[in-house]
């Protein structure tokens, strides 16, 4: 006879040992409304991690966008269709993410600020230019960076250049 502790221990071992099997079992238990079979603690953690993953995706896409905007602005002699395509793709993907996950919108400014540091690192690595070549503070507002008109082609320069 299984005690509650033994059953909980078996679920936790499954979670730790075979994550895929655990997810299949938990989904089946949810669909069957078998509440006593649910590993509540680990389910709660996994659900929370899904939200964190969405924020990480937003930050990652913003970092790539920022890096390419910096490359476009500060290494203009090397501009390419590939850089423009990456800028366009990241804008499209970010817009889609914000449309599909509107609860991320209030997080956009914080995500953009976090992405700035990563974007500069990417630009430094991709261009071999020193960190000092790029501004210490982000020269772009989030709405500006996401605008299709901002740096939309090789003839476009930001205000103030």
Image (cartoon, grey):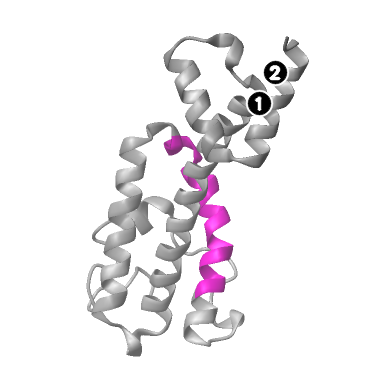
Q: What residue did someone put label 2 on?
A: 7
Q: Residues within 10 Å of mark 1 (few under 14, many from 20)?
A: many
Tell me if 17 is positioned left or right of 26 in this view.
Answer: right
Disc 2 and disc 1: Cα gap in Å? 6 Å
Say which quarter of the image contains residue 42.
top right
User: Is residue 111 found inside the magenta-colored segment of the image?
Assistant: yes
* Total marks in image: 2
Vertical order, 106 against 124 (above or below): above
Vertical order, 41 against 14 (above or below): above
Residue 62 at x, y percent in the picture: 44, 57
Q: Residues within 10 Å of mark 2 (few under 14, many from 20)?
A: some
Chief SS of the magenta region:
helix
Q: What residue did someone put label 1 on?
A: 11
Of the pair 92 and 153, the residue shown nearer to us: 92
Residue visible at 29% across and 61% down? 89
Vertical order, 76 against 69 (above or below): below
Q: Which image quadrant: the C terminus?
A: bottom left
Instruction: Indicate the secondary structure of the residue bearing disc 1.
Output: helix
Residue visible at 71% across and 20% down? 8
Residue visible at 49% across and 76% down? 123
Asked if the residues shown at circle 2 and circle 1 are in contact, with their CB atoms under 8 angstroms apart, the answer is yes
Vertical order, 61 against 53 (above or below): below
Residue 126 at x, y percent in the picture: 48, 81
Tell me if 157 is positioned left or right of 6 in this view.
Answer: left
Give, as a single range, the part of the protein colored magenta: 104-122
Of the pair 146 and 9, the residue shown nearer to us: 9
Residue 141 at x, y percent in the picture: 43, 55
Q: Which image quadrant: the N terminus?
A: top right
Tell me if 75 is positioned left or right of 79 in this view.
Answer: right
């Amino acid at each position: 006879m299984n005690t509650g502790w033994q059953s909980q221990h078996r679920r936790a071992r499954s979670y730790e040992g075979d994550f895929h099997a655990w997810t299949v079992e938990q989904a089946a238990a949810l669909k069957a409304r078998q509440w006593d079979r649910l590993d509540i603690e680990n389910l709660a953690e996994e659900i929370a991690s899904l939200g964190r993953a969405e924020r990480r995706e937003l930050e990652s896409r913003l970092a790539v966008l920022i890096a390419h905007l910096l490359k476009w602005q500060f290494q203009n002699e090397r501009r390419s269709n590939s850089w423009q395509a990456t800028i366009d793709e990241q804008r499209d993907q970010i817009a889609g993410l914000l449309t599909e996950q509107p609860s991320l919108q209030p997080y956009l400014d914080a995500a953009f600020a976090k992405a700035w540091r990563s974007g500069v690192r990417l630009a430094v690595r991709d261009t071999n230019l020193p960190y000092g070549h790029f501004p210490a503070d982000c020269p772009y507002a989030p709405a500006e960076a996401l605008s299709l008109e901002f740096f939309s082609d090789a003839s476009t320069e930001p205000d103030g250049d």
